[in-house]
Image (cartoon, coloured by chain):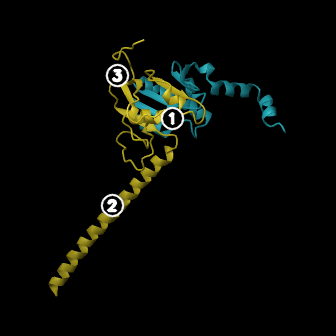
Amino acid sequence: MSLLMHRFGGEGLYILDEPEAALSPQRQLAFLSRMHDLIQRKSQFIIATHSPIIMAYPEAWIYELQEGGPMRVDWENVEHVDTTRQFLKHPQSYLKVLLEDE
Amino acid sequence: MERSSFDFKGNVMDIVQNRQDHWDNTQYPYNLDAVQSWDRLALHENVTFIVGENGSGKSTLIEAIAIAAGFNPEGGSKNFNFSTEESHSPLSEHIRLSRAPKRNKDGYFLRAESYFNVASNINELDRALALALQLSILTAARHFINNRMGRALCLC
C-alpha cells in the first residue's frame, strides 16, 4: 500500500500480483481510490487478484482463468464475487454444511 | 475488432504468444489451460484483472507478462534491477507485448511473494552501504595513522 501511495508516480505500467495481500477491506477500498488517481494520471494496471473489492473497478476487463482458458466475465459473474456474496448472505447455511460432522 | 493504437490510453494493448522453439504442450507451464488456450489476449487501456483459483496459472501468466514488459522476474521497478536467483518460468520467451506509442515514465512489478524479496534487497543495499561507509572510514583512518606514523618515523 505504501508502494502505491508513495512510490508510484503516474504515467506508469503497474503489474501487480495479489496486491490485496495484507490489506484490510478498508485499505482495499483506499487502494481502489489511489488506483483511480493513477489511472487519471495516464497509468495502466494489470492485476492478478482474489479480492472482490479490488476487481470491482468500473469498466475494467476481468479475465477469469477457467478450464479451457481465460474468459472475459463481468464482475457480477466472477466466481470469487459470487462465493463471497453467497457466504455473506447465508453464513449459517454455509457453515452448517462445511462443519457438519460426518 | 481492431483498436487504434493512437486512441489507446494505456501502453500494452495485447499479449501475443508465439509457440516456436522450446514450446512443449506436455510440459509445465505450457500445459496449463491459462497458457495454451490462446494466442492473443487484448488488454483494457486502464485496468485488466486476471482472476482464478489457486494454481490456475495467474502468477505464471502475470510474471511472463511482466518479464516481457522489461521488468525483473524478482519484481520491482525497472531500474531497481539486481537479479539474484533465476526464478522465472521460460514462458516469457514466448510472449510479446503489442504496445501503443504512448511511453511510460514509471512502472512496477509486484510479485505475490516479493514483499519479502524486495525488502531483503533493500536490507542488503543498506548493509552494503553501511559496510562501504565503514570501509571508507577505515581507509581514512588508515591514511591518518600512516601520515602520523610517517611523520613520527621521520622525527626519529
**Does B142 appear above or below A84?**
below
Mark 2 residue type: Ala
Identify residue type, mark 1: Thr
Label 3, secondary structure: give it. loop
Residue at disc 1, secondary structure: loop
Q: Chain of mark 3?
A: B
Residue beneath the point at 61% across and 27% down: A52
Residue under numbered circle 2 = B132
Tell which chain the image draws in yellow.
B
Q: Position of residue A15 (x, y in %)?
A: 45, 33
Q: Gap between marks 1 and 3, in whole Å?
A: 34 Å
Query: Foreground: B16 or B20?
Result: B20
Residues at discs 1 and 3 in contact (Cβ within 8 Å): no
Q: Residues within 10 Å of mark 1 (few under 14, many from 20)?
A: few
- Residue A73 lies, with reference to residue B75, above or below; the image says above
Between tags 1 and 3, which lies in front? Answer: 1
Q: Quick one: A5 or B24, which is closer to the camera?
A: B24
In the rendered image, residue B109, in percent from the top left (x then y), is placed at 44, 37
**Can residue A10 be seen by looking at this rendering?**
no
Read off the chain for label 1: B
| Chain appearing in cyan on the rendered image | A
| Circle 3 crowding by C-alpha within 10 Å: few under 14, some 14–19, many from 20 | some
Residue at the spot of label 1: B26
Q: Are marks 2 and 3 in contact (CB under 8 Å)?
A: no
